[in-house]
Amino acid sequence: MSNEGATRRQSRSWLVALPLVAFAVLAGLFWFRLGSGDPARIPSALIGRPAPQTSLPPLEGLIAGGAQVPGLDPAAFKGQVSVVNVWASWCVPCHDEAPLLLQLARDNRIRMIGINYKDAQDNARRFLGRYGNPFNAVGVDANGRASIEWGVYGVPETFVIGRDGTISYKLIGPVTPENFERVLKAEIEKALRAKP
């Protein structure tokens, strides 16, 4: 009887330990996968899917050509390749990538769209006043809900949207001199060559 009781206790303790062992194995796998690579290479579930149909209000007081710069209108994604950049004035890497976005904005074949993430509007206007405004439209995502729909992990992130309105590429992290030509511009060119 005592051997049977000891066997039951041993099997019960193994059942209690099993979830802990499974958690440790999964945690190890996640740590290894995320820690061993470039976070910019994390795949997005939105690639090949339509861009989120989220409208966002404009950044009030942001003027270009004497008129208010419009907010985010998802209908604008159809018919032209768009680059959507999620940014904030408080984001240090956003300051670093700003000159590269201005350079990208010189390409008349694409439409530049900004999503201003959880930012004070005065600070966002000052940011664009300091570096220049590369965007044809800037939508204000004050509470961060729209960015969740876009699958944003954190700012900055940049998306390439094809003429058909689907997301063709996502860059997690800042646009840098290293990824500007080799990665981002290459993905934009691919989207420009794709048939609508």
Image: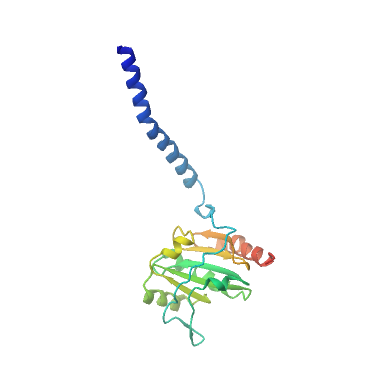
Extreme-left residue of the structure: 2
Q: Residue at x 54, y 53 (%)?
A: 43
Residue 36 coordinates in the image, percent (x, y): 50, 45
The colour scheme used here is rainbow
Residue 75 coordinates in the image, percent (x, y): 56, 72
Q: Residue at x 44, y 80 (%)?
A: 62
The quarter of the picture where residue 165 lies is bottom right
56 sits to left or right of 5: right
48 sits to left or right of 115: right
Residue in front for this viewpoint, 55 or 97: 55
Is residue 155 shown to the viewer in this render? no
Residue 34 coordinates in the image, percent (x, y): 48, 47
Q: Which residue is drawn at 34% across and 26% down?
A: 13
Residue 32, above or below 67: above
> How many dots with numbers?
0
Residue 176 coordinates in the image, percent (x, y): 53, 63
Quarter of the image with the N terminus is top left
